[in-house]
Image: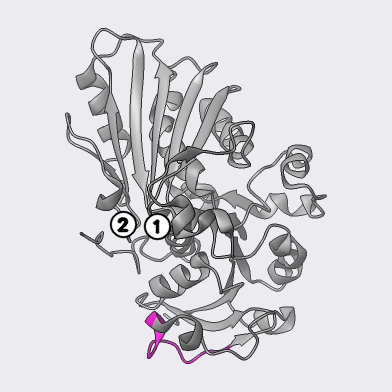
């Protein structure tokens, strides 16, 4: 089989370099083009020294006619860029994976409210699948455009989906308490992200409303087949990579700890990138650093009607670039784990 020819639009951020790192070891993929308007002509190795000797590529200006020579194009760009090129590319037979939010929310009025711009490509949604393989794999297999999920939605949805699918919780009051490392804010200059500003500190943000909330609410409702009310509060923690979400819900069925453990293990037993932790243990963000794995634990606190799920991912891998490559593998009928066998980094 010929290698899949890959283009990356917007390759100068953390997500872009993570895509490059993962694809460098993918046996069936070849990155043939990477673009950046601001860094045209700059060699990859000059911007990302970890890629020295790996790629002989330079950044070029995005050009749809040249991108059409690719089999698939990843958009690691600000919101609004992918939808401006997706129609032309898919009409030419090129598959598209958007790591921004252009195709994550199907209700375009909701999308416009949260992203502050008009969505111009609603006609493309019949080509779109939401790129969470564990729950939308068949749609991904047949799609031309993948809406790669946000990092928080990936962790939260994987954590709560088994309970929603089996109608086991009160869907009117689900709480997700999220914590993310600073790389989730991107690579741009930002005073609040300076080491002296965020080190040895811990804070909530987006309490009045976060862009990932409508994405989660819509997808959780699809999984539950009914409206879902979610309270989501993200927090910034002083680490570079990693994300933990603790999810709280009220049980509507009287299930024991043992029954809940079995439910989660059965739900994800065939999933290569979801690890349900042994009973009585808890996942740590360091256990997934640099890997495409999501680790989950479920608890029924003694004497309580509550269920507590804790879910950890690397926000740049399973929360972004790794999941995008996983989706690419599915779209091209490849082994889903190709290029994604990296073991987490310790310490």
Residue 54 falls inside the magenta stretch: yes
Give the number of the disc on residue 240.
1
Q: Is there a contact, CB below 8 Å, between mark 2 and mark 1?
A: no
Residue 280 in the image: above or below residue 242 = above
User: Where is residue 11 shown, x and y percent of the image?
Assistant: 56, 74
Residue located beneath label 2 in the image: 289
Name the residue rendered at 50%, 65% in the picture: 15
Q: Quadrant of the N terminus?
A: bottom left
Mark before the other along the chain sequence, 2 or 1: 1
Residue 11 falls inside the magenta stretch: no
Name the residue rendered at 77%, 44% in the picture: 112
Name the residue rendered at 49%, 48% in the picture: 151
Residue stretch in magenta: 50-58
- Judge depth for marks 2 and 1 and give the one in front: 1
For residue 127, side relative to residue 288 (left or right): right
User: Where is residue 315 shown, x and y percent of the image?
Assistant: 43, 53
For residue 325, side relative to residue 149 (left or right): left
Quarter-of-image position of residue 120 = bottom right
Q: Quadrant of the C terminus?
A: bottom left
Residue 98 in the image: above or below residue 273 = below
Q: How is the image coloured?
A: one colour
Whether residue 338 is visible: yes
Q: CA distance from mark 2 to mark 1?
A: 10 Å
User: Where is residue 229 shown, x and y percent of the image?
Assistant: 58, 22
Q: Decide whether the magenta segment is chiefly helix, strand or loop.
A: loop
Residue 104 in the image: above or below residue 299 = below
**22 or 152: which is nearer to us?**
152
Q: Secondary structure at mark 1?
A: loop
Quarter-of-image position of residue 278 = top left
């Amino acid at each position: 089989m010929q290698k899949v020819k890959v283009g990356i639009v917007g390759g100068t951020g953390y997500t872009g370099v993570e895509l490059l790192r993962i694809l460098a070891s993918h046996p069936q993929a070849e990155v043939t083009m990477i673009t950046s308007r601001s860094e045209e002509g700059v060699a990859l190795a000059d911007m990302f020294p970890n890629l020295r000797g790996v790629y002989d590529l330079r950044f070029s200006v995005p050009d749809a006619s040249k991108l059409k020579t690719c089999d698939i194009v990843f958009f690691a760009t600000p919101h609004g860029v992918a939808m401006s090129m997706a129609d032309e590319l898919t009409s030419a037979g090129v598959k598209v994976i958007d790591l921004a939010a252009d195709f994550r929310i199907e209700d375009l009025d909701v999308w416009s409210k949260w992203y502050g711009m008009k969505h111009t490509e609603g006609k493309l949604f019949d080509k779109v699948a939401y790129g969470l393989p564990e729950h939308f794999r068949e749609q991904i297999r047949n799609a031309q455009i993948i809406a790669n999920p946000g990092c928080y939605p990936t962790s939260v949805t994987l954590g709560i989906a088994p309970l929603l699918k089996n109608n086991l919780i009160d869907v009117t009051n689900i709480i997700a308490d999220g914590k993310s490392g600073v790389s989730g804010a991107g690579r741009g200059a930002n005073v609040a992200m300076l080491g002296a500003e965020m080190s040895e500190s811990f804070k909530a943000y987006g309490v009045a409303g976060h862009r990932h909330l409508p994405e989660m609410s819509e997808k959780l409702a699809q999984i539950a087949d009914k409206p879902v009310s979610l309270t989501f509060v993200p927090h910034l923690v002083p680490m570079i990579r990693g994300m933990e979400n603790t999810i709280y819900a009220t049980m509507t069925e009287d299930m024991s700890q043992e029954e809940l453990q079995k439910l989660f293990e059965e739900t994800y037993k065939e999933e290569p990138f979801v690890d349900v932790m042994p009973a009585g243990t808890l996942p740590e963000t360091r256990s997934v650093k640099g890997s495409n794995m999501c680790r989950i634990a479920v608890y029924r606190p003694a004497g309580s009607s509550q269920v507590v799920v804790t879910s950890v991912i690397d926000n740049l891998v399973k929360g972004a670039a790794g999941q995008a490559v996983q989706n690419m593998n599915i779209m091209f009928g490849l082994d889903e784990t190709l290029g994604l066998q990296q073991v987490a980094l310790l310490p």
